Image (spheres, rainbow, N blue to C red):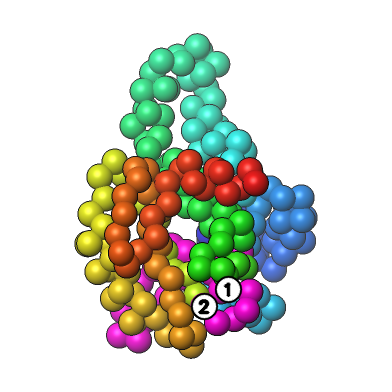
């Protein structure tokens, strides 16, 4: 959420939030997210999200159902959670994929931590890219899409990704690696495919 949105929900001026949000960021409970390529010190395009997965689950599912859980209505609450659980996991999956990038090596290149990008493309239309990371030598860029469905059409995803790359309003290095993160293994000559086993394996090493 934007600081102005958080302030509106709390009924407080946004100017009063910098210190408490800064404390939560420093403690690792909340993270500040800026689009790839933006200067964190000067950009105003900041979003704040709960970064602790357990705390995120607690506030997403348990706090809204606290009264029903106190009445031991566990099965009813779980039925409602299970309907939204896959969508919730998809966001956790995106975070895991981005966090795994510094541990990945592609064609001899290592990468800085990955970020998301959102905003107006060269076409002036809004778009979003799930994952971008610059190589440590500055000569390559890893751009990826993250999916959490059992069936993924690689050709369709690749076509969409190519369109986004062409529309991306940043200076692009000569080498661009394309990646798709999905549930099941697959192979394609133009794109690297990573699965949960790959991502968890990268992080553990």
**Spot occupied by residue 163 in the image (x, y as percentages of width and height):** 28, 76
Q: Are marks 2 and 1 in contact (CB under 8 Å)?
A: yes
Whether 138 is drawn above or below 79: the answer is: below
Q: Is residue 2 left or right of residue 124?
A: right
Q: Residue at x 34, y 43 (%)?
A: 184
Q: Quadrant of residue 39?
A: bottom right
Q: Nearer the viewer, residue 129 or 193?
A: 193
Q: Pointer 2: residues within 10 angstroms few (<14), some, or many (20+)?
A: some
Asked which secondary structure carries label 1, the reply is loop
Whether 146 is drawn above or below 132: the answer is: above
Magenta residue check for 128: yes
Q: Residue furthest front?
A: 108
**Spot occupied by residue 91 in the image (x, y as percentages of width and height):** 46, 48
Q: Residue at x 46, y 43 (%)?
A: 196
Q: Is residue 152 left or right of residue 84?
A: left
Q: Residue at x 41, y 15 (%)?
A: 75
Q: Residue at x 25, y 45 (%)?
A: 151
Q: Which residues are magenta?
A: 113-140
Magenta residue check for 192: no
Q: Provide the residue designation for mark 1.
A: 135
Q: Provide the residue designation for mark 2.
A: 140
Q: Quadrant of residue 146?
A: bottom left
């Amino acid at each position: 959420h934007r600081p102005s949105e958080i302030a509106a929900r709390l009924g407080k001026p946004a100017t009063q939030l910098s210190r408490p949000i800064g404390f939560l960021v420093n403690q690792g409970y909340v993270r500040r997210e800026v689009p790839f390529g933006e200067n964190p010190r000067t950009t105003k395009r900041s979003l704040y999200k709960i970064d602790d997965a357990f705390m995120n689950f607690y506030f997403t599912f348990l706090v809204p159902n606290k009264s029903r859980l106190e009445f031991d209505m566990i099965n009813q609450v779980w039925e409602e959670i299970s309907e939204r659980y896959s969508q919730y996991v998809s966001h956790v999956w995106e975070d895991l994929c981005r966090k795994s990038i510094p541990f990945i090596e592609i064609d001899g290149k290592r990468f800085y931590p990955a970020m998301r990008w959102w905003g107006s493309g060269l076409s002036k239309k809004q778009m979003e890219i799930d994952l971008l990371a610059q190589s440590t030598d500055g000569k390559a860029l890893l751009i990826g899409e993250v999916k959490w469905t059992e069936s993924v059409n690689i050709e369709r995803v690749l076509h969409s990704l190519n369109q986004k790359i062409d529309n991306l309003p940043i200076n692009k290095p000569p080498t661009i690696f394309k990646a798709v993160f999905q549930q099941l293994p697959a192979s394609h000559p133009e794109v690297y495919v990573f699965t949960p086993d790959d991502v968890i394996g990268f992080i553990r090493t």
